[in-house]
Amino acid sequence: MTIEIVNGWRFQSADFSVQASGKDTASGIVTLVRSPDDKTRWHDMPEELKDDDYGPPLYVVGHGMTLEKAITDANLKASLAKRIPGNMEYNVCVTCKASDGRAGNLINGECMNCYDTRMRGELVVHANLNRTEVELQRTFGILV
Ligand SMILES: [Zn+2]
């Protein structure tokens, strides 16, 4: 019997102790955890995303009367689980602190607004880069 675990996930544990205790209507559970790479990426996510009940999970739990069925259920949940956002999406500009996918491309850790402002010696705001008032003030601060 071979039971495959879906890509990006590893077998963590199985618990069929309730069944073993004689309650044959109770299902067992199988827990899968993200593979080491994804686990690292998960831990690198912003805290608010980790705390979000609807955010990408670190573990999934499958239920089933047999180990195979519980793993099949866990696999399904793993394949439906939200993906961990790519790193690009969470670039943070070191100067204006723009983040959450709004920073855009960074050069030396700075967004194009801050980089261009520094290079040209005048305030440069690119229309495609959404900025808050505070972030714009930080960019402007380069010139002060
Ligand atoms: Zn910036």
Image (tube, rainbow, N blue to C red):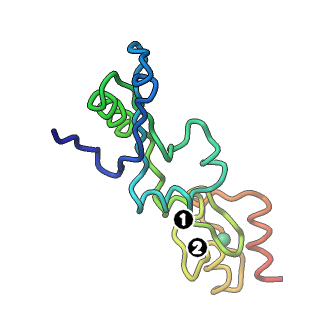
Quadrant in which ligand 1 is drawn: bottom right
Give me the residue at 63% from left, 57% from top.
130
Q: Quadrant of residue 23?
A: top left
Q: Picture coordinates of residue 83 (x, y %)?
A: 43, 47
Give me the residue at 79% from left, 62% from top.
134
How many badges with numbers are in the image? Answer: 2
Q: Residues within 10 Å of mark 2 (few under 14, many from 20)?
A: some
Tell which residue pokes out farthest to the front in this image: 21
Q: Picture coordinates of residue 7 (x, y %)?
A: 29, 49
- Residue 51 vertical position relative to residue 138 in the rendered view, above or below: above
Q: Picture coordinates of residue 98 (x, y %)?
A: 66, 63
Which of label 1 and label 2 is nearer to you? 1
Q: Residues within 10 Å of mark 1 (few under 14, many from 20)?
A: many
Q: Picture coordinates of residue 60 (x, y %)?
A: 45, 38
Q: Would you say the beta carbon of the disc 1 residue lies within 8 angstroms of ligand 1?
A: no
Say what secondary structure mark 1 lies in.
loop
Relative to 38, 127 lies left or right: right
- Tag on residue 112? 2
Q: Would you say the beta carbon of the disc 2 residue lies within 8 angstroms of ligand 1?
A: yes
Nearer to me, 18 or 40: 18
Whichever of labels 1 and 2 marks the residue nearer the N terminus, that label is 1
Residue beneath disc 1:
104
Nearer to me, 23 or 137: 23
